């Protein structure tokens, strides 16, 4: 276990270093200037420009600027927004809760409906399986933005069951406000998880040990629970973990459509305003969340599969 965790930690650190360099380098090469966004295109006296460049290290070489930003980020300081004159940490802290709640709610829906429908389709026959396949096909064809528009019109405008903008206050009100965004964000992912679950369960049903258990007269419920679902959980866990990790980046579209004050929507806004420090900070947070989620999935995979040792899985 220790060897496995150390290797995964080393990979995590290496991935974050490469990603941080790519993020910083991409914004360095991007057209436009944060000073231009700050001044609104106005011409400032040379001494004022020099002060601004010195304050934000804009007059330093690229590698020096990257090293200063990276070391500060390691110590928990993601910099300062030039246009807003506010700490990036504060700006992220004000919005990360909304994104976390949305991703958590969406993850629960994906597990409930994706895994549940996949099991029903695999164990069912005829019309049941056909219905599951049809539902997953329709869901897969709906991009998040299209699903958001349809859900807003049907359940928000026409029926008036759910609000279509904002995050609400209090637990119940927050759930009502996040229901439609979570459904829109989960649509495509539910289809993927449903199909993977259905395939994994079907493959286990055809295995020899399952047929042997059935022939010995074991209760069908025990056969499914102990021999089918337990082994099918390995690929299901993998795809669910990867899907949930990707939600963090995909949330921007849904947050924008429903007017949610989350990290994704603010990332788009910051990019439009040339607020490079905010874009770098949010991007780094999203990468960290994605990488950590994948490490958790790897650990879960190794623990679920008794045939694979933690040491060999790490290789």
Image: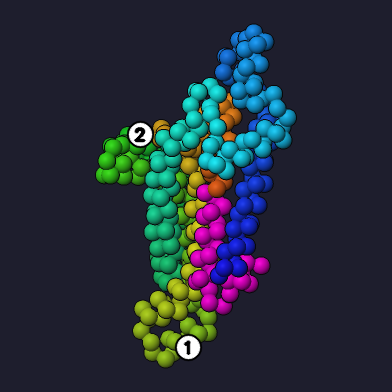
Q: Quadrant of the N terminus?
A: bottom right
* Residue 41 position in % (x across, y down): 61, 13
Label 1 element class: helix
Residue 249 vs residue 34: left or right?
A: left
Label 1: few (<14), some (14–19) or many (≥20) C-alpha neighbours in 10 Å: few
Point out the residue furthest to the bottom here. Answer: 216
Q: Is residue 7 visible?
A: yes
The residue at the point 57 percent across, 43 percent down is 74
Choose mark 2 or mark 1, whichever is in front: 2
Which of 72/22 is in front? Answer: 72
* Residue 70 position in % (x across, y down): 62, 40
Which of 275/235 is in front? Answer: 275
Residue 233 vs residue 20: left or right?
A: left
* Residue 214 position in % (x across, y down): 43, 86
Q: Is residue 134 visible?
A: no
Picture disc at residue 166: 2
Marked residue nearer the N-terminal end (2 or 1): 2
**Magenta stretch: includes residue 70:** no
* Residue 128 position in % (x across, y down): 40, 65
* Residue labelled with disc 1: 212
294 is higher (above) or lower (below) than 24: below
Label 2: few (<14), some (14–19) or many (≥20) C-alpha neighbours in 10 Å: some
The stretch in magenta equals 289-315
The residue at the point 57 percent across, 68 percent down is 2
**Magenta stretch: includes residue 313:** yes
Label 2 element class: loop
296 is higher (above) or lower (below) than 285: below
222 is higher (above) or lower (below) than 314: below
Q: Does the residue at mark 2 contact the one at mark 1 (Cβ under 8 Å)?
A: no
Residue 214 vs residue 302: left or right?
A: left
The residue at the point 51 percent across, 60 percent down is 296
């Amino acid at each position: 276990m220790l060897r496995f965790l150390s290797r995964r930690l080393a990979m995590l650190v290496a991935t974050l270093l490469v990603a941080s360099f790519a993020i910083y380098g991409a914004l360095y090469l991007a057209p436009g200037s944060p000073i231009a966004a700050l001044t609104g295109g106005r011409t400032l006296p040379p001494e004022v420009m020099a002060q601004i460049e010195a304050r934000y290290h804009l007059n330093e070489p690229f590698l020096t600027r990257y090293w200063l930003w990276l070391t500060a980020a390691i110590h928990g300081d993601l910099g300062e927004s030039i246009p807003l004159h506010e700490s990036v940490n504060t700006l992220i802290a004000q919005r990360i809760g909304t994104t976390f709640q949305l991703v958590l709610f969406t993850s629960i829906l994906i597990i409930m409906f994706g895994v549940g429908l996949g099991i029903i389709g695999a164990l069912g026959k005829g019309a049941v399986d056909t219905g599951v396949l049809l539902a997953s096909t329709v869901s897969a064809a709906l991009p998040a933005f299209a699903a958001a528009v349809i859900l807003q019109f049907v359940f928000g405008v026409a029926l008036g069951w759910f609000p279509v903008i904002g995050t609400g206050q209090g637990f119940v009100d927050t759930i009502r406000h996040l229901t439609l965004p979570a459904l829109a964000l989960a649509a495509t992912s539910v289809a993927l998880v449903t199909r993977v679950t259905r395939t994994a369960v079907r493959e286990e049903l055809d295995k020899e040990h399952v047929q042997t258990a059935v022939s010995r007269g074991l209760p069908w419920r025990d056969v499914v629970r102990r021999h089918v679902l337990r082994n099918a959980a390995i690929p299901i866990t993998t795809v669910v973990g990867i899907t949930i990790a990707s939600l963090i980046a995909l949330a921007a579209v849904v947050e924008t459509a429903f007017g949610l004050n989350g990290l994704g929507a603010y990332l788009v806004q910051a990019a439009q305003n040339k607020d490079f420090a905010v874009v770098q900070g949010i991007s780094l947070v999203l990468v960290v969340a994605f990488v950590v989620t994948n490490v958790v999935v790897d650990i879960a995979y190794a623990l679920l599969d008794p045939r694979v040792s933690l040491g060999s899985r790490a290789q």
